[in-house]
Image (cartoon, helix red, strand yellow):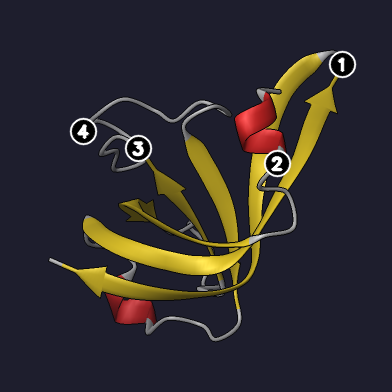
Amino acid sequence: IPQRIAALDGSWVEVAGYVAFPLPQDTSEMIVMLNQWDGCCIGVPPTPYDAIEVKLTDAVDPGQRHTLKYGTVTGEFVVDPYLIENWLVGLYLMNNATVKLEL
């Protein structure tokens, strides 16, 4: 983990990027990504290095989760490598976050 990123662990940060919500109805979790991706066919799927898993303090209106969005997320940044059988699946988390969605 680069030291410039590790130094942010536990800090409150603001990150702008493309956002996507998981398929289940729970809109209190999302992912913020460097690149645009619709979960299927448009764009490049995120990697652990260019995406942050976000847990929101308040759920987003379920009607907004099916559109491609760009937004600003503010919350507590956590560096927490998540491995499954020596494969890096996740690296960055954001807790207690709020999101401001844009078109």
Judged left or right of residue 10, residue 69 is left
**Label 2 sits on what residue type?**
Ala
User: Marks 3 and 1, how far apart in space?
Assistant: 26 Å
Marker disc for residue 7 = 2
- In this view, the mark in front (1 or 2): 2
Say which residue label 1 marks: 85
- In this view, the mark in front (4 or 2): 2
**Label 3 sits on what residue type?**
Leu
Q: Quadrant of residue 11?
A: bottom right
Q: Quadrant of the N terminus?
A: top right
Most foreground residue, 24 or 31: 31
* Mark 4 Cα shell of 10 Å, populated few (<14), some (14-19), many (≥20): few
Give the mark nearest the N terminus, 3 or 1.
3
Give the mark nearest the N terminus, 4 or 2.
2
Judged left or right of residue 46, residue 75 is right
User: Marks 2 and 3, how far apart in space?
Assistant: 20 Å
Q: Position of residue 75 (x, y in %)?
A: 57, 68
Pointers 4 and 2 in contact (CB under 8 A)? no
Marker disc for residue 42 = 4
Compared with 58, 89 (above or below) is above
Q: Position of residue 55 (x, y in %)?
A: 62, 67
Marker disc for residue 34 = 3
User: Marks 3 and 4, how far apart in space?
Assistant: 14 Å
At horizontal 22% and vertical 61% (from top left) the residue drawn is 67
